[in-house]
Amino acid sequence: MDNNVTLQEFLKEVSIENEYLQESTTYRKETVQQVIQVLKTVRDVTPFLKRYGALAYVSKVLFSTTLERQKDVAKMLNVILNDLHLKKNLSREFQECLAQRHKNRGPVKLVLTN
């Protein structure tokens, strides 16, 4: 059971990440904007399944940015895609097991220790 992630699904998830990062640092907001810029140039998400493939593609599109920024953009692309890929390929039984574990887990409490 290998369900591939479509470009539309990837774009939707990046859009959700963009909304989430609006309360974040300027650097992270700029990174997600560059992710969107890179995705405007692709038709297939395959290059982003591996980090080195993502970096190779990003370096061609964002050639005028620093290597560190290129690595950050490539990492974001890779992490989001692999997360989506994992979610799409979990068996129904495993998804139900996870849902039950989340349901049974109580609220998280922070405890101060000395």
Image (spheres, helix red, strand yellow):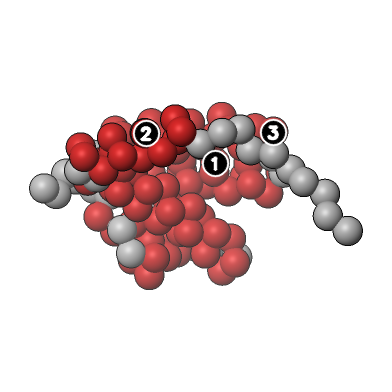
**Which residue occupies 83% across, 55% down?**
113
Image coordinates of residue 72 in percent, x first then y, are 55, 59
**Which residue occupies 46% across, 59% down?**
74
Dots 3, 1 in contact, CB < 8 A: no
Q: Earlier in the sequence, mark 3 or mark 2?
A: 3
In-image side of 9 versus 19 (left or right): left
Instruction: Residue type at mark 3: give it.
Output: Glu
In-image side of 28 versus 87 (left or right): right
Outermost residue, left side: 1
Dots 1, 2 in contact, CB < 8 A: no
**Residue 60 visible in the current orientation:** no
Determine whether 41 is above or below 58 in the image.
Answer: above
**Which residue occupies 38% across, 44% down?**
39
Instruction: Look at mark 1 in the image and give the residue it sits on.
Output: 33
- Mark 3 vs mark 1: in front: 3
The CA span between labels 3 and 1 is 14 Å
Instruction: Look at mark 2 in the image and give the residue it sits on.
Output: 100
The CA span between labels 1 and 2 is 36 Å
Instruction: Residue type at mark 2: give it.
Output: Gln
Q: Earlier in the sequence, mark 3 or mark 1?
A: 3
Image coordinates of residue 28 in percent, x first then y, are 64, 47
Q: Residues within 10 Å of mark 1 (few under 14, many from 20)?
A: some
What is the quadrant of residue 88 in the picture?
A: top left
- Secondary structure beneath disc 2? helix
Q: Earlier in the sequence, mark 1 or mark 2?
A: 1
The CA span between labels 3 and 2 is 31 Å
Q: Work out which quarter of the rendered image holds the C terminus and state it.
A: bottom right
Q: Residues within 10 Å of mark 3 (few under 14, many from 20)?
A: few
Instruction: Look at mark 3 in the image and give the residue it sits on.
Output: 23
| Along the line of sight, the residue nearer the viewer: 22 or 3 | 3
Image coordinates of residue 48 in percent, x first then y, are 33, 57
